Amino acid sequence: MRDLLTRRAGHYVQRDLDAWFAHALATGRGHYADPAARQAAADLLPRPILTHAALLAALARLQPGTDVDHLAFAGRLANADPEAAADLAAFLDRALGGQS
């Protein structure tokens, strides 16, 4: 679906689509409210989106009540260096004791 939307709307919207997918995945909204859909996303979505979602989820747990829409920097980190952003998300998750 991501590729289809990008082709139809133009490549310039891919960053917006990727952010939307990451936000939905991190917060369990829409299609990703279903745990099976979240699991399937791990096989379908590119690593920067998954990393962005993991970082958003970890940061939101760090500061409960934080709106992920205020964490736009997480997407830039995930795209700039997905491996480092994934390591940061894992570190934060461990520091928070794996809370969900």
Image: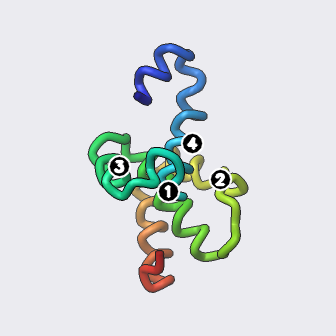
Residue designated by label 4: 19
- Give neighbour class at mark 3: few <14, some 14-19, many 20+ (Cα, 10 Å): few
In the image shown, does 32 or 67 lie closer to the viewer? 32
Quadrant position of residue 43: top left
Residue at 60%, 34% (x, y): give it.
Answer: 16
Nearer to us: label 4 or label 2: 4
Query: In 3D space, how far apart are the residues under numbered discs 2 and 3 (Cα atoms)?
Result: 25 Å
Give coordinates of residue 61: x percent, y percent. Answer: 57, 74
* Helix, strand or loop at mark 1: loop
Query: In 3D space, how far apart are the residues under numbered discs 2 and 1 (Cα atoms)?
Result: 20 Å
Residue at 29%, 48% (x, y): give it.
Answer: 40
First in sequence: mark 4 vs mark 1? 4
Amino acid type for the residue under numbered disc 1: Gly
First in sequence: mark 3 vs mark 1? 1
Residue 73 marker:
2
- Give neighbour class at mark 1: few <14, some 14-19, many 20+ (Cα, 10 Å): some
Residue designated by label 3: 37
Nearer to us: label 2 or label 1: 1
Total number of numbered discs in the rendering? 4
Residues at circles 3 and 1 in contact by the CB criterion of under 8 Å: no
Amino acid type for the residue under numbered disc 4: Ala
Query: In 3D space, how far apart are the residues under numbered discs 4 and 3 (Cα atoms)?
Result: 17 Å
Amino acid type for the residue under numbered disc 2: Phe
Residues at circles 4 and 1 in contact by the CB criterion of under 8 Å: no
Give coordinates of residue 6: x percent, y percent. Answer: 49, 22
Amino acid type for the residue under numbered disc 3: Ala
Q: In the drawing, does residue 87 fall left or right of residue 58?
A: left
Give coordinates of residue 90: x percent, y percent. Answer: 42, 70
First in sequence: mark 4 vs mark 3? 4
Q: In the drawing, does residue 11 fall left or right of residue 2?
A: right
Residue at 59%, 25% (x, y): give it.
Answer: 13
Residue designated by label 1: 28
